[in-house]
Image: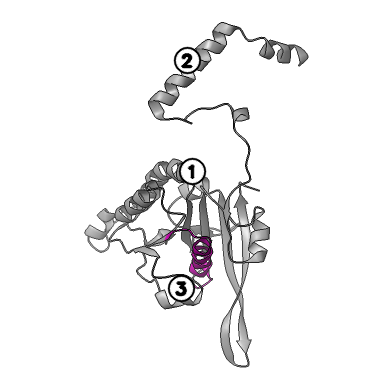
Amino acid sequence: MLGDAAERKQLSPEKLKALQLTMDKIDKTYGRGSIMKLGDENIENIEVIPSGSIGLNYALGVGGYPRGRIIEIYGPESSGKTTLAIHAIAEAQKMGGIAAIIDAEHAFDRFYAEQLGVDVNSLLISQPDNGEQALEIADMLIRSSAIDIIVIDSVAALTPKAEIEGEMGDSKMGLQARLMSQALRKLTATISKTNTTCIFINQLREKLGVMFGNPETTTGGNALKFYASVRIDIRRIGQIKDGDQVNGNLTRVKVVKNKVA
């Protein structure tokens, strides 16, 4: 081990010169910062956008949703997925950030968002016609470097154009999974470079014929599971009542994947 360290310290001037020339060429071709020595950069704490919940901030380990990463929030219907994402938008706006939502479900309630603290007048919203359009708009907004947080609601509603234009009952197996896989390969690097927090809301489905194990699965294939740095499972476990009147829902949130803490 000591011998290896000594060899590393005694790199020849020719090697160092060749390495520097190559790094300069890479920087010139692909832009400054395309390659660097890890020791040349100061290690900074991960920037975050608070979730709006002290408990969830603690569970995430870094105090909120990490910047420059993909987050997936999934759960059954009416479990609080969109509410959780709207709280994140409100927190980003409180910090002076710009927020956008891709409302693929065409079900965004501006009055509910306003009650949760969102400045709806400055919120950017798009209600696309198909999945390709939704993801292209998201890509353009992220590439602008002006957006701090973007929410895509939801993966299940990102219907491929071919499926929309086809006949009812036509089999279009795997189209959505392919669309998500292509989009995430394209988006991941851009999200990191622009330091944008990207939240995908997803729904649960049940796999047919599963006898053992958990039959639940998320829509849109496996690409999002792989590319997401944080995955959050949210479930409604009860109601908040004042006498017979229901004032809210009690939810349980589980961080099932966390690559930042």
Mark 2 and mark 1: span between their CA atoms? 27 Å
Q: Amino acid at mark 1?
A: Ser
Judging depth in this view, the residue of 182 and 91 nearest the camera is: 91
Relative image position of residue 57 (x, y in whole percent): 64, 60
At a point 63% along the width and 28% down the height, the residue shown is: 39
Query: Is residue 123 found inside the magenta-colored segment of the image?
Result: no
Residue placed under numbered mark 1 in the picture:
192
Amino acid type, callout 3: Ala
In the picture, measured across the screen, residue 240 lies left or right of residue 148, that is: right
Horizontal relation, residue 159 to residue 91: left or right: left
The percent coordinates of residue 168 (x first, y second) are 25, 64
Q: Secondary structure at mark 3?
A: helix
Element at label 1: helix
How far apart, in angstroms, are the residues tagged by discs 3 and 1? Answer: 27 Å
Mark 1 crowdedness (10 Å alpha carbons): few <14, some 14-19, many ≥20 = some
Which of disc 3 and disc 2 is earlier in sequence?
A: 2
* Crowdedness near tag 2: few (<14), some (14–19) or many (≥20) residues, C-alpha within 10 Å: few
Q: Which label number is shown at residue 21?
A: 2
Residue extent of the magenta highlight: 78-99
Query: Depth-wise, is mark 2 or mark 3 nearer the camera?
Result: 2
Q: Is residue 59 visible?
A: yes
Residue assigned mark 3: 113
